[in-house]
Amino acid sequence: METSDLTSLTESALMDKRIRDMPLSLEDTALERLIAQLYRELSEKNLLFHPPCFLADEWFCPVGVPAIGIPFYLAHRRLRKLEKKIMLEVEGGSRREFLRLMRHEAGHAYSYAFNLYKKKHWRELFGSASEEYRDTYRPRPYSRAFVTHLDNWYAQSHPDEDFAETFAVWLTPGMDWRKKFRGWKALEKLEYVDALMKTLAMKNPVCKPASDLRIFAGLSMKLGTYYKRKKKLFEEDYPDFHDKSLRSLFTSVPEERSESKASRYLRRNHEKILSPVTRWTREKRYTVDKLMRKLIERCDALNLYVRRDDEQTDFAVAAYITTLISNHLFTGKFKRSK
């Protein structure tokens, strides 16, 4: 089957296909050229090891395996469009974001390839790589102990991610990291990575990648199953605890009502609210959109209306949704535990 055959399938037929059976490849694609760009960046640092790449269900580096998994949907235009339609964004969809993610994953690959995480000074600076990954973390946005590279202050989530983010900043072409992070505690980590990488110049990895990386890909499921699981990761079933807040934002009292229903107001201002919230919180568009849809449904159920002559509605609604999303980012929940 030719790759173009994916374009001719109906969405239903596409969802019923196993991902591993789709004619997808990194070879002779724009992705292959971007991977080559990463390899050039490594070579310019005199680093001989170029982590092999493979199509997988997400961005990741298998634990202990110096290789980079790249989301399969990036390998085909039809799948990128479908990802955008369902998840509202395509992680790694632009050249800039793709390379940012690749540099990060290359950091993981180098850590595994040369057992860097076992070094004493590595552990002193970054922490123990054996520390358990948590579902959520509480980032400190103003901390200068960590570099900033990927969104959501990702370096703060785990020692492994701290190293990978530091490596990515160090590797970024044209990045004057000494100037950017002058006065930061994170600069010590960058200086360490710089010195450490010089010791690895022109060296082959101690730990080599597996010969068949497909065993780590996670692509045996049907596309429909993949999206069912992925959507579940960003959804949260929450009770009617919004009711009190929604009644404060809007009104059900006849004499206070304007002509606009609250649900219609939220639909009309959907993008106007969603875009700045996602921009400032760095949360997934899918998560914000899902929350807004739930709020719209609840406003309909409560028969709420925008208050007459209330000039603060736009601000109040945006502030409420931003608060919920920020709490979700920091705790994994839209509301705080009581």
Image (spheres, rainbow, N blue to C red):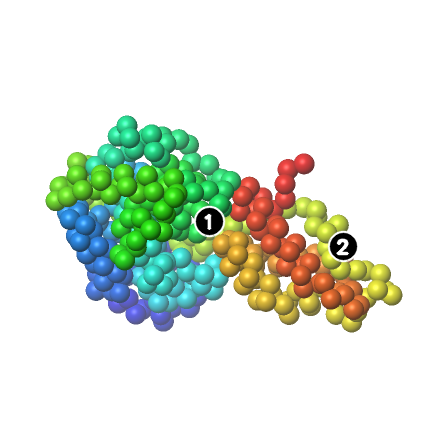
Q: Which corner quadrant of the image does residue 191 belong to?
A: top left
Residue on which disc 1 sits? 152
Residue on which disc 2 sits? 248
Q: CA distance from mark 2 to mark 1?
A: 30 Å
Query: Is residue 57 in sight in this rendering?
Result: no
Q: Pointers 2 and 1 in contact (CB under 8 A)?
A: no
Residue 167 in picture, x, y percent from top left: 29, 45
Going 37% across and 62% down the picture, which residue do you hit? Answer: 93
- Which amino acid, by three-letter code, is at mark 2? Ser
Say what secondary structure mark 2 lies in: helix
Query: Is residue 260 in sight in this rendering?
Result: yes
Residue 165 in picture, x, y percent from top left: 35, 46
Where, quadrant-wise, is the N terminus in this rendering? bottom left
Q: Which corner quadrant of the image does residue 39 belong to?
A: bottom left
- Which amino acid, by three-letter code, is at mark 1? Asn
Where, quadrant-wise, is the C terminus in this rendering? top right
